[in-house]
């Protein structure tokens, strides 16, 4: 007759009974526990064990759900923060976000050289009136894309008005800023053919010691 390995004084397997219990907690069913029992005490013990397993599984799944909700809330919070400081159309900083970043930049880089440049797309109103606001939005997005492409993380770029952009270039000399802005203007004019002449105007101020 088979016995459980390395045990003594156990009832032979052919004298035991197979019992099964639902593993659940409240209204959630997690599975079935199947075991061999030889006495009513065994059955009672196994029943208690199934209840404890259900409770333990409930807490495990509750903790997993809690962690999932926390991750979702953190992601939503980050999205809200990005939306609060980003321009929805162009993806660069909005007015609030730009000046917030500028203040932080001045705090961290006081005394270092910088250039503050302004750029606005020419004749945006005429483009909107003649070709529709969608075409104007495309042109504004193209300005922002070219600015991001050329400056990357070296500058803080913001859309501070309808057709107005502002760029803070850190550790930049005036001659370098003039050349880069001129190159960007040419890129915007030559990038794609349109039914209207594209251009934007820009000017800048240079300081040897930002924040002073």
Image (cartoon, grey):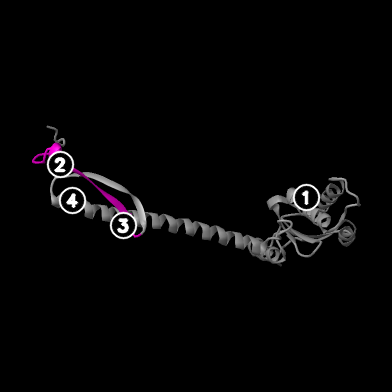
Secondary-structure class at tag 2: loop
Question: Who's the residue at 27% across and 55% down the image?
Answer: 52
- Are discs 1 and 2 less than 8 Å apart at CB? no
Q: Distance between the residues labelled 1 and 2?
A: 79 Å
Question: Who's the residue at 80% across and 50% down the image?
Answer: 180
Residue 16 is marked as 2
Foreground tag (2 vs 3): 2
- Are discs 4 and 2 less than 8 Å apart at CB? no
For marks 1 and 4, the one nearer the N-term is 4
Q: Distance between the residues labelled 1 and 4?
A: 75 Å
Neighbourhood count class around disc 2 (C-alpha, 10 Å): few under 14, some 14–19, many 20 upward? some
Foreground tag (1 vs 3): 3
Residue on which disc 4 sits: 43
Residue 196 picture location, percent across and down: 91, 52
- Are discs 1 and 4 less than 8 Å apart at CB? no
* Residue 123 seen in this snapshot: yes
Secondary-structure class at tag 3: helix
- Are discs 2 and 3 less than 8 Å apart at CB? no
Where does the C terminus fall, quadrant-wise? bottom right
Foreground tag (4 vs 3): 4
Which segment is the magenta one?
A: 7-26
Residue lying furthest left: 9
Q: Distance between the residues labelled 4 and 3?
A: 19 Å
Where does the N terminus fall, quadrant-wise? top left
For marks 2 and 3, the one nearer the N-term is 2
- Are discs 1 and 3 less than 8 Å apart at CB? no
Say which of 170 and 193 sits in front: 193
Left or right side of 82 for 38: left
State yes or no: residue 30 in magenta. no
Residue 170 is marked as none
Residue on which disc 1 sits: 146
Residue on which disc 3 sits: 55
């Amino acid at each position: 007759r088979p016995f459980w390995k390395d045990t003594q004084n156990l009832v032979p397997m052919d004298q035991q009974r197979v019992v099964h219990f639902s593993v659940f907690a409240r209204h959630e069913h997690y599975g079935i526990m199947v075991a061999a029992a030889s006495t009513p005490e065994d059955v009672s013990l196994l029943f208690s064990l199934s209840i404890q397993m259900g409770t333990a599984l409930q807490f495990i799944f509750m903790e997993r759900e809690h962690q999932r909700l926390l991750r979702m809330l953190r992601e939503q919070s980050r999205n809200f923060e990005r939306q609060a400081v980003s321009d929805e159309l162009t993806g660069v900083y909005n007015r609030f976000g730009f000046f917030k970043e500028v203040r932080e930049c001045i705090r961290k880089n006081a005394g270092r050289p910088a250039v503050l440049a302004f750029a606005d797309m020419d004749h945006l109103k005429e483009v909107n009136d003649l070709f529709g606001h969608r075409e104007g939005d495309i042109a504004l997005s193209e300005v922002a894309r070219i600015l991001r492409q050329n400056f990357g993380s070296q500058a803080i770029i913001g859309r501070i008005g309808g057709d107005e952009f502002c760029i803070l270039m850190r550790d930049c000399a005036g001659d370098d800023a003039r050349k880069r802005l001129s190159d960007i203007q040419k890129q915007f004019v030559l990038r794609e053919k349109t039914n209207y002449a594209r251009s934007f105007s820009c000017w800048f101020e240079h300081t040897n010691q930002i924040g002073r």
